[in-house]
Amino acid sequence: MCTYLTEKIEISGSGKGASGWFALRGATVYFDHPVHAQAEHTLNIDFVDPAKGPSARVAVELTAESARALARAIETTLGSVPAGLAE
Amino acid sequence: MAAGTVRLTGHGGDDIEAYLARPVDRAGFGSVVVLHHMPGYDEPSKEITRRFASRGYAALMPNLHYRDAPGAGPDDASAASRANGGVPDDRLVGDVSAVVSYLKALDGANGKVGVIGYCSGGRQSFLAACKLPLDAAVDCYGGAVMRLREGMGMKVTPVVGLAEGLSCPLLGLFGEEDKSPSPDETAELSAELTRLGKEHEFHTYPDAGHSFFSVNRPSYRPEAANEGWERIWEFYGRLLAS
């Protein structure tokens, strides 16, 4: 199925794409067909800077289980940062 | 056959690219508009386009994501299209109209044009056939024809309300294990088309879900795909061939 489900957020940080590092301005998160992963559906994240064009993109395609594990790892990591450091 | 990228003027006078595959050894051929799946104007979709030419049809596949990312790879263009809210319906219809004109003007064309679409292109195939005068339409597991689920972030709306305008016979090829469209949804669509007196032929294959034609994906189901191709050749042979 095509889920069409798409979340867009603004982010700040950097990513390394095909042409090297660039500043990230946004992320698109969706659960749909992957381009490369051998699964029918994956949780896909595109880290982008739209101002630099469509190829300024760092893409990941994760199985649902992997995506949930990643989300937990991010929360665990941020939760263990000393107070005041990751506000 | 001959195949390659061509340019044409699409919806709103925009310059777009399209992939053409056509017979070189005959005249009087029918034509097919190929609408690619959500992952974009990629190599497997070009292979499908060439497959029609190998069967004696001219086939032209517009890059529906071209405006979102001219010159970018199909994966980047697909991501950009999604981030922009998807392919607008009016733009799709305008682009298909331009592709139909291009195909009808080909030297050797018999003037009959069908459309086929996969995944999101299945919905777009139905949409185009409801908005434009065509000779045959094929919907391969197009979701969001009958209804959407909650929480969609893209500008995609159901198109079943346009069925009154369906201009040609419709062949639907679906997987029994698909969630969108589910067998319940395609049964509802069939009932609506019957109510409206619209000629249609639906096949739902067991042990197949979404994208069962995609030979490079784990969803590929050779039995369903082979059966489906046979239905397509029969359908287009009856309606598009001279």
Image (cartoon, helix red, strand yellow):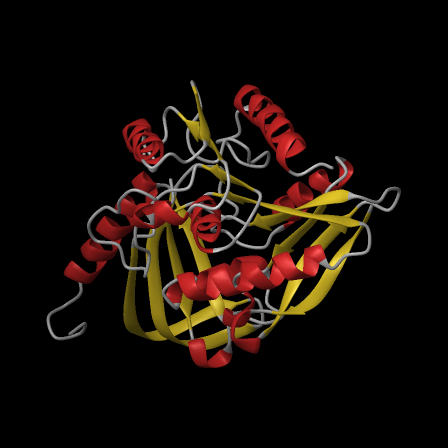
Q: Please give the name of the residue rendered at 62% of the width and 57% of the height, measured from the top-left corner.
A: B100
What percent of the width, then of the height, locates residue B223?
A: 56, 19
Q: Residue A72: where, in percent of width, then height?
A: 22, 49
Name which quarter of the figure residue B228 lies in: top right
Residue B181: name its quadrant: top left
Foreground of the two, B13 or B167: B167
- Find residue A43 and report its horizontal and vertical position in percent: 35, 48
Instruction: Give whichever of A9, A22 is nearer the camera.
Output: A9
- Numbered disc total: 0
Residue A80 shows in the view: no
Q: Residue furthest left?
A: A83
Q: For the view shown, which residue lies furthest in the front direction?
A: B197
Q: Up-down: is B53 above or below B128?
A: above
> Which residue is at 41% across, 36% downward?
B198
**What residue is drawn where x is 32% and y is 41%?**
A64
Quadrant where the image shows the C terminus of chain B: top right
- The extreme bottom residue here reads A51
Against B116, residue A50 (above or below) is below
- Left or right? Give the position of B21 relative to B127: right
